[in-house]
Image (cartoon, rainbow, N blue to C red):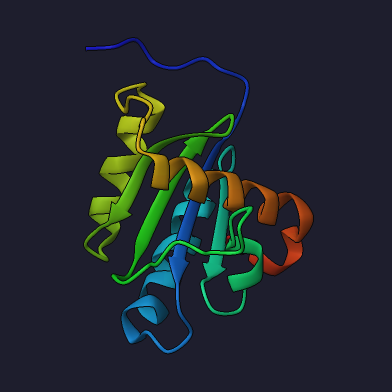
Amino acid sequence: MPAADASPSPWLVACLCAAWCRTCDDYRTVMAEAAHAHPGLQFAWVDIEDHADALDDSEGAAEDIENFPTLLLARAGTPHFFGTLLPHAGVLNRLLAQALAGELPPLADATARRMTDAVVRLVHDQPQQVQVAAD
């Protein structure tokens, strides 16, 4: 088992959803509860339609997100998880525990890296628009 990660850079936990997605509506509460439980992590709620321009790559093409909720876990600009997950608090909590324990290796996937770059820029440039409020 890898040692816990002691890096000073906080984890970014970004949920990529859409306003029309009813599953995402319910998941927003799960994300807010996780943000409250993990104040040292940075949580973001990214509406893929509202923020489509910010998610574009250098050639103006955004990655297609077709399944919701899609979660991105990144640290220091490096993705460690990028995928759809069951919209249950237990699933998110286990994933966060793995991240905090240093058990999620970096992803080499080009799509995950492009999306990480875009989400990190969005969080930096528009933090109030994507912030998850901890209950």
Whether 77 is drawn above or below 71: the answer is above
Residue 122 image offset from top left, x and y in percent: 68, 56
- Comparing 97 with 50, the one in front is 50
Q: Is residue 14 at all visible to an observer of this figure?
A: yes
Identify the residue at image location x=51%, y=72%: 48
Horizontal side, residue 83 vs residue 86: left or right: right
Q: Quadrant of the C terminus?
A: bottom right
Residue 30 sits in quarter: bottom left
Q: Quadrant of the N terminus?
A: top left
Identify the residue at image location x=36%, y=30%: 108
Residue 4 image offset from top left, x and y in percent: 39, 15
Pick out the residue farthest to the front.
Answer: 59
Residue 5 sits in quarter: top left
Identify the residue at image location x=63%, y=46%: 120
Whether 90 is drawn above or below 88: the answer is above
Horizontal side, residue 8 vs residue 11: left or right: right
Whether 8 is drawn above or below 27: the answer is above
- Comparing 125 with 118, the one in front is 118
Horizontal side, residue 84 vs residue 124: left or right: left
Residue 79 image offset from top left, x and y in percent: 44, 37
Q: Is residue 135 at all visible to an observer of this figure?
A: no
**Number of labelled discs?**
0
